[in-house]
Image: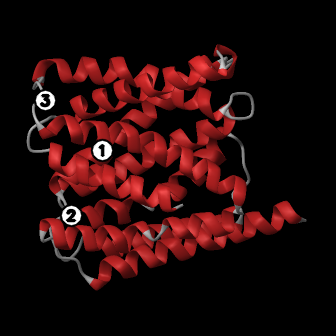
């Protein structure tokens, strides 16, 4: 989880640094390109069988949704404080639960309803729509979280048959042409330190996925997922010291409400699995 936390923070900083010079689609193009090159080297050692899949259509649907999620995340980083982006991202479990109910026919239990309600309440506390004008980028991040929720739901269906390496490989392979197409009209050739930041984005995108997967093999979800919440106070400090971004107590309050809702749902799922 230390690797996961460091990866997300470094990715956010790299995205912030690149935002003034390179468009979001181009950042995602290089993210996929670098990831594909790294994964190709890994596959050359472990064998092509490791990425065989019988769910290509699901991979395409998952990565179309995941691309939207990534695009909104990096777009939000360019315009609103890092802490706001990370806090709003914690709504992903809400949209995942809703998508799982619709697509996977999972039961919508009382605990899930409470979790979803608390999550939406947390969003209202953070955005305070009746008190101030909501920045459009914040709404984009909400849409991004919805897209992530759909992508996570499709991932749960895919990994029943495909390996995690396969999921990562097709993520980069499918999203590469999407990023290329969208970046073409506004292409800016990277120069100097921009190459370093692009490398950081590409590497941390993989290390975050890998770290989370490994963490879940060593510890229960009930331990791992709450640790992910540490991203918020860490990114608050990073935003404060690197970009002079201020934050309010209501941000932590709203995120805490969402985390509590997520925790209730996790605990219920944990008890169900044990019984």
Counting labels gives 3
Q: Position of residue 102 (x, y in %)?
A: 63, 43
From mark 2 to mark 1, how far is it between C-alphas?
Answer: 14 Å
Q: Earlier in the sequence, mark 3 or mark 2?
A: 2
The residue shown at (50%, 64%) is 228
Question: Front-most of 38 and 274?
Answer: 38
From mark 3 to mark 1, how far is it between C-alphas?
Answer: 21 Å
Instruction: Locate the C terminus by quadrant.
Output: bottom right
The residue shown at (39%, 76%) is 254
Residue occupied by mark 3: 190
For residue 262, say whether it is visible.
yes
The residue shown at (41%, 73%) is 255
The residue shown at (48%, 56%) is 3
Residue occupied by mark 1: 72
Instruction: Locate the N terminus by quadrant.
Output: bottom right
Residue occupied by mark 2: 81
Question: Front-most of 194 and 179?
Answer: 194
Q: Position of residue 144 (x, y in %)?
A: 37, 46
Is disc 3 placed on a helix, strand or loop? loop
In the image, which is nearer the foreground, mark 2 or mark 1?
A: 2
- Is 97 located above or below residue 203 in the figure? below
């Amino acid at each position: 989880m230390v690797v996961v936390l460091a990866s997300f923070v470094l990715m956010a900083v790299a995205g912030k640094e690149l935002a003034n010079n390179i468009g979001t689609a181009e950042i995602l193009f290089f993210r996929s390109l670098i990831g594909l090159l790294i994964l190709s080297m890994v596959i050359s050692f472990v064998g092509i069988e490791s990425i065989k899949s019988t769910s290509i259509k699901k991979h395409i649907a998952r990565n179309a949704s995941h691309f939207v999620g990534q695009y909104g995340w990096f777009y939000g980083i360019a315009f609103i404080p890092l802490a706001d982006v990370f806090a709003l991202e914690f709504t992903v479990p809400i949209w995942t639960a809703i998508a799982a109910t619709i697509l996977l026919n999972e039961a919508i239990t009382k605990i899930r309803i409470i979790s979803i309600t608390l999550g939406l309440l947390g969003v209202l506390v953070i955005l305070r729509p009746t008190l101030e004008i909501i920045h459009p980028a914040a709404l984009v991040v909400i849409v991004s979280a919805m897209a992530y929720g759909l992508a996570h739901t499709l991932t749960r269906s895919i990994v029943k048959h495909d390996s995690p390496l396969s999921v990562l490989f097709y993520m980069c392979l499918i999203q590469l042409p999407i990023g290329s197409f969208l970046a073409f009209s506004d292409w800016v050739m990277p120069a100097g330190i921009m190459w370093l930041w692009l490398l950081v984005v590409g590497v941390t995108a993989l290390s975050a996925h890998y770290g989370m997967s490994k963490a879940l093999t060593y510890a229960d979800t009930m331990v791992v997922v709450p640790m992910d919440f540490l991203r918020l106070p860490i990114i608050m400090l990073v935003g404060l010291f690197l970009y002079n971004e201020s934050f309010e107590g209501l941000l932590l309050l709203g995120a805490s409400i969402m985390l509590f809702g997520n925790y209730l749902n996790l605990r219920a799922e944990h008890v169900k699995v044990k019984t």
